[in-house]
Amino acid sequence: MLSLNTYGLQRAAPSNQVTLPRLVHAGNAAASLSKLASQRRGIHPLFQTTGFDYGRVVDFQDIGLHKSPITRPFAKHIGFTSGFIEGPYTDSSLGSIEMKKKRLVLSDRLKAERKIRTKDKYDEKQLQLSFKREIRRELREKRRLELLEQSAAATTIQRYVRGALVRWRLRRQHLAVQNTAARRIQLFCKSQMQIYDAKQQLQRIKQQRWDDAAAVIQRRVRSFLACNAARRELDLRRQLREARRFEMLQAADRIRAEAATEIQRVVRGYLGRRSVVEKKLQHDRSRASLSRDRDVVKKPTKAKASRAPGQFAPKPPKKTRGGRVENTYARRMSSSEPSPDQS
């Protein structure tokens, strides 16, 4: 990665992201150059990221080795470097020998540091693992307690559910028994009600017949009583009618007798008055004839002088529509006097 960056073959990173070069080795692991640089500067391992490549001796000339262009197609210079190192070339210069010595010393120091860091890291890992084991143990205990609690809760729920199911089954059985008993009671009650209804219908039929017979008897008795009452009323009315007829006949006879008496009285009075008038007329005629005979000799003047003042000659009788002759003087006469015809 560093060689690619050196030759300008690595892609440009975006402005908001920083890409650090990675170190490769035969184990196909990776390490950051910045981490290696921080290790050389003596940074505390707790502030470093854990990894496999801590303390590994890496130099710039080792970067990109043991990688073929097939694995890294962009690193074309890797083929020349690996061929140069693996080839029969030997660097016997003084600088190269000193550099190799420095590298060996640095490698030993780095190995010792790496061993120390590895041990520290191992201790840290063991501490972390023990902490994790404790956490896992606590979690397992907590999980076990939760499982026990859940098991107890499930047992309680199962107990309640089973109790509810048993109660429900018993209730269903009890309801079935009650339904059977109720059905039997209903059948018995229905049969009794049907019998009672039949008896009531028979009683109603008998009562209807009795009512009809009583109505017929009452009608006959009322008709008989009404006929007797009508007969008595008819007899009474006949008696009353006969009594009224007899009274009317008596009244008619009495009226007839009174009318006959009145007629007789009137006729007798009329006949009496007539006879009186006739007698008076006869008497007047006789007196007139006598006076004429007497006055023949006398003078008329003397006759007028001898007549009393206020006396006039009698008027002739006045006739009515019925041919009766009326006279006030004759009416004053009694009807008991006999008429001239009767005498």
Image (cartoon, rainbow, N blue to C red):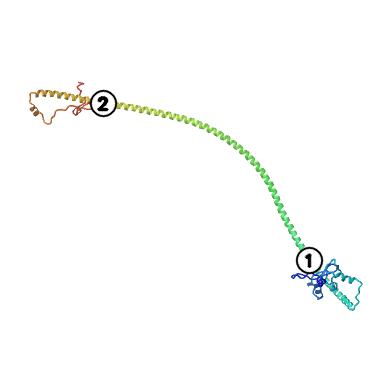
Query: Residue at the right extreme?
Result: 88
Which labelled disc corresponds to residue 263? 2
Percent across and percent down for residue 200 are: 58, 36
Say if residue 115 shows up in the picture. no
Judging depth in this view, the residue of 254 and 24 nearest the camera is: 24
- Indicate the secondary structure of the residue bearing disc 1: helix
From the image, tell me which residue sits under label 1.
Answer: 132
90 lies above or below 136: below
Judging depth in this view, the residue of 31 and 142 nearest the camera is: 31
Say if residue 172 shows up in the picture. yes
Q: Are marks 2 and 1 in contact (CB under 8 Å)?
A: no
Left/right placement of residue 32 relative to residue 209 reads right
- Which quadrant holds the C terminus? top left
Count of marks overlaid on the render: 2
Q: Earlier in the sequence, mark 2 or mark 1?
A: 1
Percent across and percent down for residue 245 are: 35, 27
Percent across and percent down for residue 60 are: 84, 73
Q: Quadrant of residue 268?
A: top left
Q: Quadrant of residue 120?
A: bottom right
What amino acid does circle 1 point to?
Lys
Percent across and percent down for residue 67 are: 85, 68
Q: Residue at x 66, y 44 (%)?
A: 179
215 lies above or below 108: above
- Indicate the secondary structure of the residue bearing disc 2: helix
Q: Quadrant of residue 333?
A: top left
